[in-house]
Image (cartoon, helix red, strand yellow):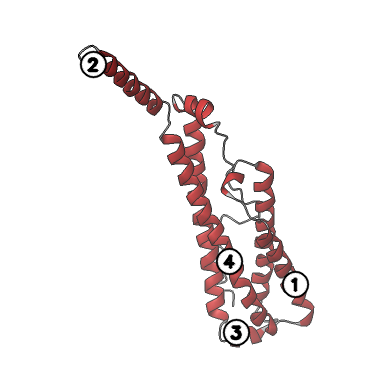
Amino acid sequence: MSASFPTSFSRAMIVAVGAASLAGCGVNAIPTAEEQAKAKWADVQAAFQERANLIPNLAAVAKGAAEQEKGILVGVTEARAKATSIQIKAEDLTDPAKMKAFQDAQNQLSGALGGFGRLLANAEAYPDLKSITNYQMLQSQLEGQENRIRVAVRDYNEAVRAYNTEIRTFPSIIGAKVIYGSKPMVPYEAKTPGAEVAPSLEGKI
């Protein structure tokens, strides 16, 4: 009994030292940072989906527009269909090509919505728009949603920055390479001019 105690104790010590070494290599910090980034991406997707859900309501607003301007609504509808057809799973966050496809589709929709916003702002050409009951509510919802998207993207990019830094710095880089095979995640880049500023129609109608 006494002879086996040192052996058992030695094994326990080895396990304890090994666990401490692994912890020092970021074995816990890496998945924590990864899950945080994935959670923030879910917020980004939810924000974009909420924006897409508002777009069908634009059809009612567009009734006050001239016939030749209906092409703007068609463009918005087509951009929405493309944007909602591209979904990014958690495992795709390290794939630059898939992320670019998603970003391009969302940026195209942002551009189309910008055109629609300019149409709504032109009260002289479309005075009937002001008489639509839900116009002010829809306007406020779209502006608010663009703000939520901007905040969600900012938070996601910060989480990605933290994760990418974690897997590239010592000692976590050891765990990232040896245990997890971690790859850098792709930040979200909004390339539509003015996308970093939420649109506002206040004072234009």
Name which of mark 3 and mark 4 comes first in the sequence. Answer: 4
Q: CA distance from mark 2 to mark 1?
A: 78 Å
Q: Which mark is residue 5?
A: 2
Q: Classify the position of the C terminus by image quarter.
A: bottom right
**170 sits to left or right of 107:** left
Q: CA distance from mark 3 to mark 4?
A: 22 Å
Q: CA distance from mark 3 to mark 1?
A: 21 Å
In the rendered structure, which amino acid carries the disc numbered 3?
Lys
Residue 78 falls in image quadrant? bottom right
Count residues near mark 3 (Cα–Cα under 10 Å), then give few for <14, some for 14-19, many for 20+. Answer: some
In the rendered structure, which amino acid carries the disc numbered 4?
Arg
Residue 174, above or below 105: above
Q: Which residue is mark 4?
A: 51
Q: Nearer the viewer, mark 3 or mark 1?
A: 1
Q: Which residue is mark 1?
A: 74
Residue drawn at x 66%, y 42% as measured from the top left: 96
In the rendered structure, which amino acid carries the disc numbered 1?
Val
Residue 204 falls in image quadrant? bottom right
- The secondary element bearing badge 1 is classed as helix
Q: Which mark is residue 130?
A: 3
Residue drawn at x 58%, y 81% as measured from the top left: 135
- The secondary element bearing badge 2 is classed as helix
**13 sits to left or right of 25:** left
Count residues near mark 4 (Cα–Cα under 10 Å), then give few for <14, some for 14-19, many for 20+. Answer: many
Who is closer to the viewer here, 177 or 145?
A: 177
Res. 168 visible in picture = no
